Amino acid sequence: MEVTSIAIEQKRVEGILFDIAVHTNLTPDHLDFHNSLEEYKKAKLKLFTRAKKAVVNLDDEGMSKDILSLFKGQVITYSMKQKADVFAKVIKVEKTGTVFQLHVSGDNYLVKAPIHGDYNIANFLAAFSACLHMKISIQDLLKAANFITGPEGRFQLLTNHPSHQIILDYAHTPEALESLVKAIKNLPHKRLILMVTGVGLRDPKQRPFIGKAGDGKADEIGVTVDHPGPYNRRNMVDDVMKGFSSSSSVHVKLHRERGIHKALSLADKDDLIVLTGLGFGGYQVIGKENVPYCEYDVIHQYFKKEQKVLV
């Protein structure tokens, strides 16, 4: 299960002793609740005071050392940059997945998994390490690696529109967007069309940094709105635009549906369209209402409209 820092502070998991606590990273998030990165870290560290075993990402400078100095139980560390109990080095990136060398306690294994991006490889290592804590054999874990399926909206490559390469990704923070763009660069494509969003349900101060993370990273960039809630759509877009340099050419649409259609319309053969944000959850929060929304329907509507034009 995911235990958020807010849940810990609100005592929603009070009294629970976890068998394994897994650390991935510390990046600025939920600061509208915690007020500072230090307070956010303190909240996350509390999880490791109520766990029997821990998995720690050595590549995260934000809090890995804090956990290792605080935690007294059994620890498995993982990394993609330095020596750890579980370590991975990427060998080759293909359209169908990533080939990497896996080092576990002195033994080496060649693994191909249907996942992309260093952050997803790191998540693989985190899950792998948790399974080692549970005494699952390495051989069983390696067999399972071939059958991994990514969660909806996480580097999700759509295959039902073969004329277009379309990726959906949950990236809605500056750090996640930077990691995503880095991973995409390894995929074959002619031009990159990237859609980013200002999010109403997250810290408004992060919006300009979303623009900065996307600035200059694609051939065409679209900016739109996710879950506006009580916020003014134009103001949200303007916040994101503050992060772009004056030389950037950006296409602005105040509604996510129109932003997606614009991004699709900009693509030619062999281009890659990447649609980021919180679009896959089944609804959009508009005002105080959860309004039904389906990303797949929006994409399908675009191609259905294009077919009518051709006819």
Image (cartoon, rainbow, N blue to C red):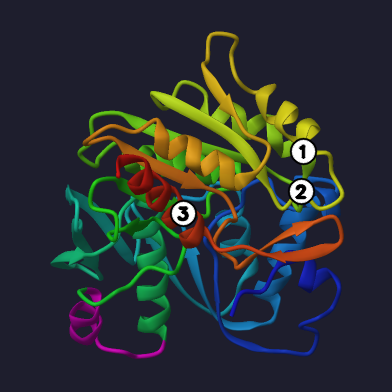
Circle number at residue 301? 3
Q: Are marks 2 and 3 in contact (CB under 8 Å)?
A: no
Q: Is residue 136 magenta?
A: yes
- For the N terminus, the image quarter is bottom right
Q: Tell me if residue 256 comes above or below residue 15 in the rendering.
A: above
Q: Earlier in the sequence, mark 1 or mark 2?
A: 2
Q: Amino acid at mark 1?
A: Arg
Q: Amino acid at mark 2?
A: Pro
As measured in the structure, the alpha-carbon distance from the residue carrying label 1 to the one carrying label 2 is 6 Å
Q: Which residues are magenta?
A: 134-145
Q: Is residue 242 magenta?
A: no
Label 1 CA crowd tier, 10 Å (few <14, some 14–19, many 20+): many
As measured in the structure, the alpha-carbon distance from the residue carrying label 1 to the one carrying label 3 is 23 Å
Q: Tell me if residue 150 comes above or below residue 256 in the rendering.
A: below
For this orientation, the residue located farthest to the top is: 247
Q: Are marks 1 and 2 in contact (CB under 8 Å)?
A: yes
Pointer 2 residue: 228
Q: Can see residue 81?
A: no
